[in-house]
Amino acid sequence: MKGLKRILGLCWVLLGPLSMIFMFIQAYEKVGLAAEGVEKTNTALQWGIILCIFIPISAGLVIFGRYAMAGEYDELPDNAE
């Protein structure tokens, strides 16, 4: 189980930056395809909000994966007390 946690930690570390790269590419494409004027402004605003929300989520994935690879989750308590 410890090996699986470490492997999944590597997956999380890689997934964070890859997801952000994918989202920036999508934002660039969608804003570029929008018609000029108000529609382009609205699309850019929507993608700006989406990116501001998902950047911390992506950073959290990297941090979570780093801790998993370091073995921080190997010994978890049996109860909450």
Image (cartoon, rainbow, N blue to C red):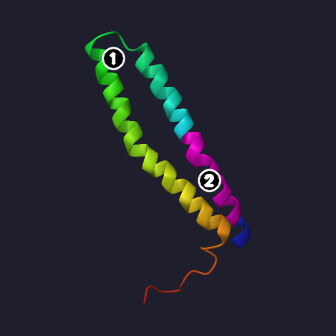
Q: Position of residue 38 (x, y in %)?
A: 26, 15
Q: Tell me which residue sits at (33%, 30%) in the image.
A: 46
Determine which residue is flagged by label 1: 40
Residue range of the region highlighted in magenta in the rendering: 6-19
Is there any visible trace of residue 1 in the rendered image? no
Q: Position of residue 28 (x, y in %)?
A: 47, 23
Q: Position of residue 4 (x, y in %)?
A: 70, 65
User: Mark 1 packing: few (<14 Cα in 10 Å), some, or many (20+)?
Assistant: some
Looking at the image, is 22 positioned above or below residue 80? above
Question: Which amino acid type is shown beneath numbered disc 1?
Answer: Lys
Looking at the image, is 77 positioned above or below residue 39? below
Determine which residue is flagged by label 2: 13
Question: Which amino acid type is shown beneath numbered disc 2?
Answer: Val
Please say if the residues under marks 1 and 2 sit with CB atoms less than 8 Å apart: no
Q: Tell me which residue sits at (44%, 16%) in the image.
A: 32
The answer for how far apart the CA atoms under marks 1 and 2 are is 33 Å
